[in-house]
Amino acid sequence: MSNKLLWEPSSERISNSNAIKFIELVKKNYNYEGKTFNDLWKWSVSHPKEFWNSVWDFSEIIGEKGARLSNEAKNFWEYRYFPDAKLNFAENFLQRKDDGPALIFYCEDKIKKTYSWKQLYETVARLADALKKAGVKEGDIVSGYVANMPETTIAALATISIGAIWSSCSPDFGVPGALDRFSQVKPKVFFAVDGYYYKGKVFNNLEKINKVVSQVTSIEKTIIIPLVEVGLPQNCGTEVILFDDFLTKGNLPALEFPKFPFNHPIYVLFTSGTTGVPKCIVHGAGGTLLQHKKEQLIHCDIKKDDKVFYFTTCSWMMWNWTTSILSQGATVIQYEGNPLYPKADILFDIADECKMTFFGTSAKYLDTILKSNIVPMKTHKLKELRTIGSTGSPLCGEVCDFVYRDIKKDLHLNSFSGGTDIISSFCMGNPISPVYSGEMQGFGLGMNVKVYDEQKNEMPIGKQGELTCVTPFVSQPIKFWNDENNKKLIKAYFSKFENCWCHGDWLEKTEHDGVFISGRADAVLNPSGVRIGTAEIYSQVQKVDEVLECCAVGQKWNNDERIVLFVVLRDNLKLTDDLITKIKKVIRDNATPRHVPSKIIQVRGVPKTNNGKLSEIAVKNIIHGKNVVNEDSIANPEVLDEFKNIPELQV
């Protein structure tokens, strides 16, 4: 693969970057002599303790580092950095107490409000005090059935400040999905938003809250965050109180920051649940903070007073990641609702209004903007915008080209990939290296990623294999909830290759020291024994204007596997023989004949997880007559019937 150059940072941008300042620190302390960012990556994975020690110093972590840099454990999953360190995660977020904006919140076109740093600090103080008076103590779980809004951020920080653990999911989850999560962790206190807006419509959540609270018997108090103003739920079996009424009143209580161990648990994150009941992944304070500091400061070049936006929900680890922006002294811009409502370019309106410096989104959103013929370069100023971040799925070349052609020419397009499992990324961009179309710029610092085949042989440039990480990193999960002797954790990540993290993504390295991820390993296509990543097909189909979305799966057929491509077309279009020919030609001309599907079938929609990711596994199960495991993990289950008993798949 040889992709075209899209952007190179100016010498001024390089010299002013946090990455260069970090390199100068490493040179001073460790006689480092590298020249490129890839050289820095090589040093970081060959000297991991020195690297993470440097990140601690560079990011000015508030806490006590301790004497040892690691516990030197032999097992990957037991290895811990900074085993003697003490810190308070929330303290690192609440250093500013001025009148500048900490949180700017938009709810479609319905609501806009701002919390200053002073208001944020004081509200966290009042809520932390109220939680302690409610009996919440170190190690307790506090959960949220919540929207992406300031009160949610405040609830999480207040919870963590006193040593308790935060877990959440978004309010669009159905009751079974919420119960799958909250019934496992057994929260003592439950925050819930009364409802939410989507495409201008009001969705009342009170009945769902009643059902969840009545079935999760550990909940002692329910705190309602008003968003759509529909009142309080009735008869849910616990004390119910509005958020503002719950806060401690009168004189401002002292906000104490007791110090906890480096690996003290702060978050429980839930996997999507597409292969069974969601796994409960526990993340620690120090590893999460250090990893997010590294990514945001060095890879994303975020600085104090920047205005940072990421479109996310409270079910996705990008919400946790975005919350950490506060620890940089930068403003977080939050958006709740449909990102294309009431107009398709509303997020660009917000970018101009807030003077956004970092615009975080998904590949799907950028593709939708492209196919809607929106050209922000002509309609918006975007003067302060320096970076567009993209994650959730691979970013194809056509969308990369669109960003530089139609959004802004002088811009760092930072595509990254990781997961809930690590609350961060294995692959990321950086602000001092070129950007090439259709590929990520490289691996995250300190993440010793290798590309292996089935026999654990390292694959050369241009050859695909499993994404593995061969040495421990700070943000690996400290455990799974209720997982005796780490049995589930070991099975999830270390069963394929001994003492080596296997992430489940399928990728290849490029000649530019970059990375191309071609999909999930469990969704890899295998016609005639040739392994093909689904993203290789998607990146070509996106060039076909008639197609809005697609899903490729392998169907067992005649003792082999054939590729079946399901397509969602623009309104009122039908899949004709001519369009099938066109799609196949685009794939054949830009990939290989092996990538061309045997069958192309029109559907009205493709299944997505609640995190917005395509669920090829659900489609594959259905066409092979199997049940979809945990159907409630699918955000749009009504489309699943589309894939049952399709006549074209019988011939």
Image: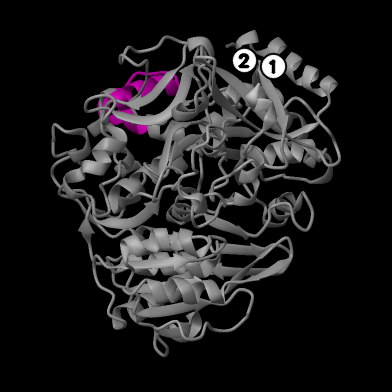
Residue at position x 63%, y 36% in the image = 645
Q: How many numbered marks does the figure carry? A: 2
Q: Quadrant of residue 369?
A: top right
Q: Is residue 208 above or below residue 616?
A: below
Q: Position of residue 331 (x, y in %)?
A: 54, 57
**Please, what is the three-letter code of the amino acid marked with disc 1?**
Ile
Residue, disc 1: 587
**Please, what is the three-letter code of the amino acid marked with disc 2?**
His
Residue, disc 2: 595
Q: Is residue 64 among what the camera can see?
A: yes
Report the span colored magenta.
24-45
Outermost residue, bottom side: 250
Q: Is residue 93 among what the camera can see?
A: no
Q: Split into 4 quadrants, where in the image is the N terminus? A: top right
Q: Nearer the viewer, residue 387 or 555?
A: 555
Q: Position of residue 523 (x, y in %)?
A: 50, 28
- Residue 455 falls inside the magenta stretch: no
Residue at position x 73%, y 60% in the image = 199
Q: Nearer the viewer, residue 529 or 240?
A: 529
- Residue count near mark 1 (Cα–Cα under 10 Å), binned few <14, some 14–19, many ≥20: many
Q: Are marks 1 and 2 in contact (CB under 8 Å)?
A: yes
Q: For the residue labelled by badge 2, is the local secondary structure a helix, a strand or a loop?
A: helix
Q: Position of residue 355 (x, y in %)?
A: 67, 52
Q: Position of residue 221 (x, y in %)?
A: 38, 80
- Mark positioned earlier in the residue sequence (1 or 2): 1
Residue 301, labelled with which disc? Answer: none
